Amino acid sequence: TLCFQAFLQMCNLPIRVVCRANAEYMSPSGKLPFIHVGNQVVSELGPIVQFVKAKGHSLSDGLDEVQKAEMKAYMELVNNMLLTAELYLQWCDDVTVEEITHPRYGSPYPWPLNRILSYQKQWEVRRKMKAIGWAGKTLAQVLEDVDQCCQALSQRLGTQPYFFNKQPTELDALVFGHLFTILTTQLTTDELSEKVKNYSNLTAFCRRIEQQYFEGHDKDSSATVTAQSAKRSLLR
Amino acid sequence: MAAPMELSCWGGDWGLPSLHPESLTVMAYAKFSGAPLTVNTINSSWRAPKGDVPVLISKDVVISQPARILNFLRKQKYNADYELSAKQGADTLAYIALLEEKLLPALLHTFWVEAENYCSVTKPWFASRIPFPLSLYLPGKMSREALNRILLTRGGPPLYSLTEVEAQIYRDAKECLNLLSKRLGTSQFFFGDTPTTLDAFVFGFLAPIYKVCFPRVQLQEHLKQLPNLCRFCDDVLTCYFRLTVSGHSPAGQDTADANLQKLTQLVNKESNLIEKMDDNLRKSPQHPPRKLTTLKLAAGGEESSPLNRLSP
């Protein structure tokens, strides 16, 4: 979710974050998050970027063709490695699944619906992992892949403030979203966030974007608190 | 130097050493890095392919996925990425991810899911190389796995029918080909003059699309509109995979031949440059005064004699 917020903040577009229990069903593609603008609903990063571009805001206009190709390639790398690794850790690592994911995913629903829905989601994710060949990977191998990905990102970033020098682009938003989530989410082990912390320029990058674009973070967190209480009243 | 290494993979046809993209990637990397691999193509003898193909066997180590095989080769000091900078190494990973996400689904679809292609080309070809009775079962299984993979990774809502998914994956594949073409530009390989891991992966994915003759060929037609990618595939095939008449590459003298090929290419390039320079000199307008004209003619005369020697 954070990468979308970051992207929209970078475009200087004001947004309001709302948490809803049936968010997955409201989204046109079944995927979270999505934005609701006037009477249009758009989900997923690709379409949202294009939607924003059509309205006249774009972050990657200053790039030439080769750089745009590079940016797309790096975005695929992040999606391929980091997203899959996050999914793996959340749904295929038994310890994490038991202690964190099941309770969190099923929390808006009463028993037994919460167990059924989270098992269903787990089964779906495991099927996908099997199809792309990640089912046979151990946790150590997944962490090694994440490390390789972070190394690549760190080397690409180097000492620049953003991935494509002075201006932030969609890639910066995407990377920030994933890395920040990894660094701040509480899991049973800290190994994933340790891998990211090994690369100091990546942590500095996250902090810089957080400071620059999320100064109103306190306001956001109070909004989520009220949304949580609103959610519970919805269930009554 | 190291223990003898044996690679088990699918064989080739239509001028390619292998039809399987992952096998082709590993073979290309081995050629680029000079690793001495004995290639065993799977045929209908009773040693059926176990598990994922390609499989590298060295002493008692068995390694199966291309990324892991390449890592193993690098540890054995067969490294094609030796001269890459850190940033170029990072770019390699990113472009490989792009290939796997955007191009692979369409490749799998063209080979295994598109009904006409599968029934008339892929299934008979693979069935002829797998021992009976597995040949009745294995191609079907590979086809189902390919469809599964496409649907699970790309088939979520809002794409609800197979035709919509197909349209989307071909759009993505064409975009990916365009991006690769832009990145390659006019250079011979992706990172300069020597091939690297990225070249191996791109070759592995592009060559089957380029060479295999299918009835339904929208991806091949799109690829043929990108001449630098076609030239890239042809270059790798002629320089690194010179197949003898029987279709098997000569073992042992490959690296020497490859170097000789490279040298010949360089010499040819130089002679082409000299020809071009000479042409330019002769074609340039007659602005300078008469003194210089005579000098130029003399220079033209001197240039033309080595030119005569060089041209066949």
Image: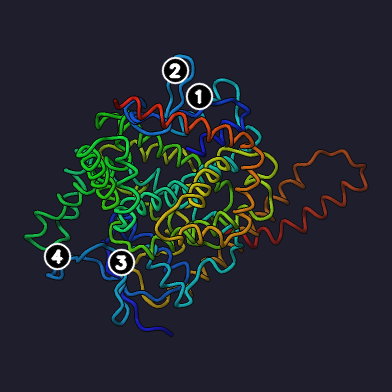
Q: CA distance from mark 3 to mark 1?
A: 42 Å
User: Residue at the left extreme?
Assistant: B133
The residue that mark 4 highlights is B44
Do residues under tags 3 and 1 come within 8 Å of each other at their CB atoms? no
The residue that mark 2 highlights is A40
The residue that mark 3 highlights is B64
Asked whether the residues under marks 3 and 1 belong to the same chain, the reply is no
Identify the amino acid type marked 3.
Ser
Identify the amino acid type marked 4.
Ser
Q: CA distance from mark 4 to mark 2?
A: 58 Å
Q: Nearer the viewer, mark 3 or mark 4?
A: 3
Q: Nearer the viewer, mark 4 or mark 1?
A: 1
Give the numbered dot on residue A51: 1
Where does residue A36 sit, x and y in percent of width and height?
46, 22
Residue at 9 percent across and 54 percent down: it is: B136
SS for dot 4: loop
Identify the amino acid type marked 2.
Gln
Q: Is residue B118 above or below residue A43?
A: below
Do residues under tags 1 and 2 come within 8 Å of each other at their CB atoms? yes
